[in-house]
Amino acid sequence: MRQIRLIGAEGEQIGIIDTRDALSMAREKSLDLVMVSPQAVPPVCRLLDYGRFRYEQQQNEKENRKRARAQEVKAIKFRVKIDDHDFNTKTGHVRRFLEEGHKVKVTIMFRGRERTHPELGERILHRVADTLADVGTPEGMPSMMGMDMNMIMAPKAAPKREGSRSDAPQSETPATRPAEAPRSEAPANA
């Protein structure tokens, strides 16, 4: 008869007992006898509800996949000669990404002679950072890489994973309304 080291349902050490006795204990408690460490001498087994164990394991894997997906780096591109409406639209997209918990790589694309004026691109990146200061912060200073100038924005606070879906439509609506208000005021002031 083979002996095993048995661990109870609550994690307590029961001791070294015969396999048949362990199986009968599992039947009495309506649990499963699961081999935890077959290489050990004697092998280690545990009393547990295997269906519930598998369910919890799958839920943990699912949650880990969600977290991994939530840490993507999104990218948005601006041009040096960008109009106010385009700027507001693109910063709205960046705002949404930041509220979802993503990092955002903001890129200014230069063409031809625009490259000789990197201060224009820097000005736009600072304007993006100032506009979105309530939801995100730049991770560093803007850096020039080839024909592009990049800046990475990180969300200020961790997103509410469970509540963000129900809050998302509400939070997007106010985010777009303030962006529209300055446009309607700008022609009135000009």
Image: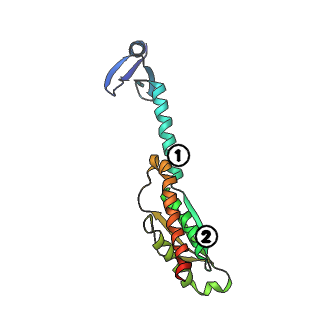
Q: Residue at x 33, y 26 (%)?
A: 10
- 10 Å crowding of disc 1: few (<14), some (14-19), many (20+): few
Q: Residue at x 45, y 29 (%)?
A: 53
- Residue underneath mark 1: 65
Tag count: 2
Location of residue 154 in the rendering, given as x and y in whole percent from the top left corner? 47, 64
Secondary structure state at the residue bearing disc 2: strand
Secondary structure state at the residue bearing disc 1: helix
Left or right: residue 99 compared with residue 90? left
Q: Residue at x 44, y 63 (%)?
A: 135
Q: Nearer the viewer, residue 8 or 95?
A: 95
- Report the quarter where the C terminus lies: bottom right
Left or right: residue 111 compared with residue 140? right
Residue 35 location, quadrant: top left
Location of residue 97 in the rendering, given as x and y in whole percent from the top left corner? 53, 60
- Residue underneath mark 2: 77
